[in-house]
Amino acid sequence: MEGARWVTENCRERGLPFTVGFHGGGEPTANWRLLTYLVSITRQLAAEHGIGWWGYVATHGVISECKANWLAENFNLIGLSCDGPPDIQNSQRPTMRDNPASAAVVNSARAFARHGTPFLVWATVTLETLDRKPEIARYLFDHLGARSIHLEPVYRLDRAASSPFGDRDASRFAQSFLIAQQWALAAGMGIHLSGSRFDELHGPFCNPLRDVLKITSTGDFGVCFLDIDRASPRYQAFAIFEGGPPASVVVERIE
């Protein structure tokens, strides 16, 4: 795999561990055989080059206990999406078969905890759940065993006609976040909001100023997941080219 070899060589030269994250563009566990293959091959490359390996995976948690156990055994950190109590979770994240997702997420969280694998919970806050952040924090702590959570407002995408949040909602969001934060700190749980982080260079899934290589589902190298469509006028600004066309990652087809 060209992308992995490139990263491995750079990490070896700088004395850094091979760090890989699986997230964005859908559910990483949906293509289970590809995920397990990529973990195996990147671990192998890191070992061959005498460097460490560190892995992160993001998941919606609606997976079997067997898969949850495998993730816990093979990743150093897991990001778990859960928007709150069952009525919120099942409404905002319905499954294709309309089976309640909340119970499966709880089971996955408990599997991670049994293995002692650190996990953080990402909860998307909508206009409908704006004032329920303290309740959401308590649920994630009590039922998922979360020790670190991110409460993130849903934000506008290019394909969306409008944003569910407006300027008038900022003070309400801040007030309920501070109440949730006060409770979480007293309970010993970390609570975060992406917002502004003055101690690091970052962007919304876009890291042109950081040493981060992002590989899209089409096999292209780039630095921004917001522009992965080759038809986008901004695509070429973020794609990495070698000799003309975008460099591609060669992954063996797994039958």
Image (cartoon, grey):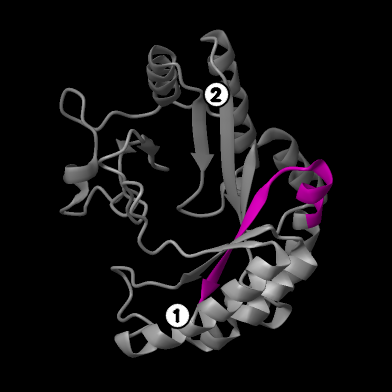
**Residue 191: quadrant of the picture:** bottom right
Q: Amino acid at mark 1?
A: Ala
Q: Residue furthest bottom?
A: 168
- Which quadrant does the C terminus fall into? top right
Instruction: Please provide percent x and percent y for residue 136.
Output: 65, 76
Q: Give the vertical position of 54 relative to 175 (above or below).
A: above
Instruction: Please provide percent x and percent y for residue 120.
Output: 62, 55
The numbered mark, 2 or 1, whose residue comes first in the sequence reads 2
Instruction: Please provide percent x and percent y for residue 127.
Output: 47, 86
SS for callout 2: helix
Q: Amino acid at mark 2?
A: Thr
Q: Which residues are magenta?
A: 110-125
Asked if residue 66 shows in the view, the reply is yes
The answer to whether residue 255 is left or right of residue 138 is left
**Residue drawn at the location 40% of the way across and 21% of the way down:** 2
**Residue drawn at the location 31% of the way across and 81% of the way down:** 162
The answer to whether residue 15 is left or right of residue 113 is left
CA distance for labels 2 and 1: 41 Å
Q: Which residue is mark 1?
A: 174
**Residue drawn at the location 33% of the way across and 49% of the way down:** 202
Q: Which residue is mark 2?
A: 42
Q: Residue furthest right?
A: 114
The answer to whether residue 201 is left or right of residue 83 is left
The answer to whether residue 113 is magenta is yes
